Structures are given as structure tokens and as C-alpha cells.
Amino acid sequence: MSDLSGRTTIVVGASRGLGRGIATAFAEAGAPVVAVARTAAALAELATTTTTTVGTIQPEVADAGDATVAADLLDRYEPEVVILVAGAGPHMRPLHQQTWETFSVNWHTDVRIAFHWLREALLAPLRPGTRVVVVSSGAAINRNGSPLSGGYAGAKATQRFITGYARDESRRAGLDITVTAVMPTMTPYGDVGRRGIRAYAGRSGQSDEEYLKELGDLLTPEIAGSALVDLVRADPATTAPEYLLTAAGLQNLP
């Protein structure tokens, strides 16, 4: 896996933020990238502005939460790498100002996407040696959750759990599909992070800039892309089941 040329990579949620950085990094590493998102204009812009002489980016406009989409794209492209980054932006309100619909939005998007794609990867099954990475969130392992984002932290924790379930089923069936969970720290380089920073800064009486300063070094799309390329290139026998992703790259969980 150290050479990514010819290793078809599907990036779900590739049109913006960390997903865009990851798609770009894999293309620059030589992989043919299938970039999946719902926004045609953003995907077209990604495909035309990413300059690389080694890899390519093929846009696929689709709703990743549709089970038929996961089955169709996995069957059509037979990828050797699948990276799931897509999810909904949570409604940033305290609990008593949420409705059930706003509270549960990430259960019906983020968890749904992970469920369908992991299920289809195991059912196909994808070829031996395939790498599947589910990008969850650092909120999944925060002891206080994320009190201003409704069910977001719980949904992200569930993504982490079902990634582990899929990893175990792959092992039990002898499929040789490596399934890894990655949990990024909060970053302003994406819609979800920007919403969170604005909400938590306001809650603490700070400006966005003051809150960001307290966060320290920030995770960027470029750092995320480089980290995931390194992860996929590494020998699966040497990789952990899950990682925290920070500005310093992938970190083992305590």
C-alpha cells in the first residue's frame, strides 16, 4: 500500500473542509480519487482546481446516506481505499432549545452514512487488503460530550462503535479489510468546526479569535490529508484500530 498509484480511493464528503483536503492529498499521492458529495458545483471546482500529475479526481454527485449509493459506487469502482468524512452540521443550541428533529440530525446523517457504507463494504465484500477509514470526531471521546450540539457527540461515538463492529466482523470472516476510526479535534477549517467555535466562544463570552487562541495549533485540511495518506500507506499490522487526529497528526488514544 506504500504506492498509491492505481489504488482507487473513494472519499465521501470530499467537497469541503477536511474531506477536500483528504481527497486532494490522495490525488497528489497518485491515487485515482472518486470524490462523493451532494454539491455539484463544489465537486466540479475541486476536480478542476486540484493540480496533480499523478492522481485524478472523479466527481460523483450523490447522497451518501442513501443505501443504494453506497452499494452502487462500491460495485462500480471496486475501491481499495474508502474514507467516510461526510456528515451534517449540528444545530448549535443548548439542550432545552433543541427539538427532537434538530437534536437527532447527526443520527440520521453521520451514523446512517457510516452504517450503510460499512455494511456494504462487508457484504460485497471489498477485496482483501482494502482500507476503510471512518472520520468521526474528537467529541466522541470528550468526557463532557458537546453540550451545545444536540446529539452530535453521541452520534460520533456511535460511528466509532460501529467502526469497531465492522472491524471485528471483517476479522471473524477472514475478509482482510482494515477498518479504522479517526477522530479529529475541533478546527475552523470546516463548517462543523466553525459552528462549534462560534457557539462555544459566545457561550464563554469570548470572541472567535480568543477562543481559537486557546485551542492552540489547529488541524488543517492539509494536515488531515497527509495524515490519512500516511495511515493508508502503513502496514495494517502496525496501525491502531483508532486514532485522535490533531495538528500534530495521528495520535494514539490513551
Image: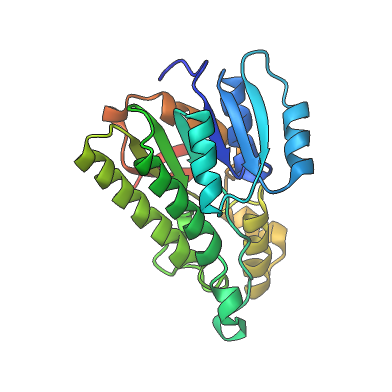
Quadrant (top left/top right/bottom left/bottom right) for the N terminus:
top left
38 w.r.t. 46: above or below: below
Q: Residue at x 36, y 54 (%)?
A: 162
- 101 vs 238, nearest the viewer: 101
Tell me, yes or no, if residue 182 can be seen here.
no
Q: Percent from the top left, x then y, of residue 207?
A: 72, 64
Say whether residue 139 is left or right of residue 88. Answer: left
Q: Which residue is at the far left?
A: 172
Find residue 240 and report its image quarter. top left
How is colour applied across the structure in the image?
Answer: rainbow
Q: Residue at x 62, y 84 (%)?
A: 97
Find residue 231 and report its image quarter. top left
Q: Residue at x 22, y 39 (%)?
A: 173
Figure label count: 0
Q: Percent from the top left, x then y, of residue 204?
A: 62, 73
Q: Percent from the top left, x then y, of residue 118?
A: 41, 47
19 w.r.t. 53: above or below: below
Say whether residue 230 is left or right of residue 65. Answer: left
Say whether residue 139 is left or right of residue 24. Answer: left
Tell me, yes or no, if residue 115 can be seen here.
yes
- 197 vs 106, nearest the viewer: 106
Q: Percent from the top left, x then y, of residue 6?
A: 52, 17
213 w.r.t. 36: above or below: below
Q: Which residue is at the far bottom?
A: 96
- 18 vs 33, nearest the viewer: 33
